[in-house]
Image (spheres, rainbow, N blue to C red):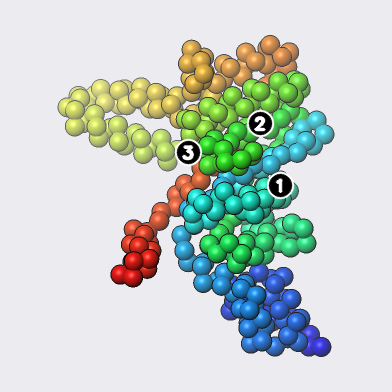
Amino acid sequence: MAEITAALVKELREKSGVGMMDCKKALQENDGNLEAAMDWLRAKGLSKAAKKADRVAAEGLVAIASREDGAGERAAVIEFNAETDFVARNDLFQSAARRFAAAAIEVDSVDALNAADVGGKTVQDEVTNLIATIGENMQVRRMDAIAVSQGAVASYIHNATAPDLGRIGVLVGLESAADRAALKELGRKIAMHIAATAPLSLDTSDLDPAAIERERAVLMEKAREEGRPDNMIEKIVSGQIAKFQKEVVLLKQPFVMNPDETIEQLVENTGKTLGSPIKVTRFVRLALGEGVEKKADDFAAEVASMTGG
């Protein structure tokens, strides 16, 4: 039997767009013959996946998974895209999203996740198989994870399709020696707040300076157009920037369930009630399709193909 080299597997993958494991199997089944392996993949329906790779995938699911880690906890959120909302309701797609989210707990990037093992295959190979089975382009587009050494990582899914699956996923890390169940309850409330308000940063100190400068430039120009005196503009804008920061920084935002207290005050007061200080270490918010733009001509082309136009 011919030796199946890594270079040969790579070449077949580049030609077919099929995952590494399936390419290796195709070559093994065909004694290393590249053309025969291509035909084998076509017969299995796998090479069709490559033809779908240029379609825009902006639907799908956001999935969350977590596990306790001693006194702490780890959790991950992923965005698993497909072309249509219909596929997001498919059991195979939902099952894959859950498994991919669980695998994301152990990695730190999308590339690492795509290479991660899930039941003897990589995530990327599983995605390729789903493309061939379901018939739509798919990709694991984004992921993030939070870990705390002591405390809890709370989560919330907005517009849930099924448990831990939906259109917006939020994670909140809470470091504390307080009761974990109580921390989870607090964290879920904060996560719901984050889903609704989409803050730009956790604290004022980690707000992107570029975001502040963009806002400052807009406010300065607006003040000039309103005819404000030059010697007053800087003072006016500084006050407006302070207000802007309160609007976009999580800890400074009024809590949506009780606008009389900020998130910072909510956390501090809850810590006093539970008898242990609480620190919000980080948050993650992933919204399905965020930043993905479907080309206008994609829809026109789809309509034309269906109508024969």
Instruction: State the residue position of label 2.
Output: 154
Q: Nearer the viewer, mark 3 or mark 2?
A: 2
Residue 240 at what x, y percent from top left? 35, 25
Amino acid type of disc 2?
Answer: Ala
Residue at position x 66%, y 23% in the image: 185
Quadrant of image for the C terminus: bottom left
Residue 258 sits above or below residue 73 on the image: above
176 vs 299, left or right, is: right
In the structure shown, which secondary structural element does the residue marked by tag 1 occupy? helix
Residue 250 sits above or below residue 131 on the image: above
Residue at position x 33%, y 70% in the image: 308
Density class for disc 1 (Cα within 10 Å; few <14, some 14-19, many ≥20) is many
Give the mark nearest the N terminus, 3 or 2. 2
Disc ID at residue 208: 3
Disc ID at residue 102: 1
Disc ID at residue 213: none
Q: CA distance from mark 2 to mark 1?
A: 15 Å
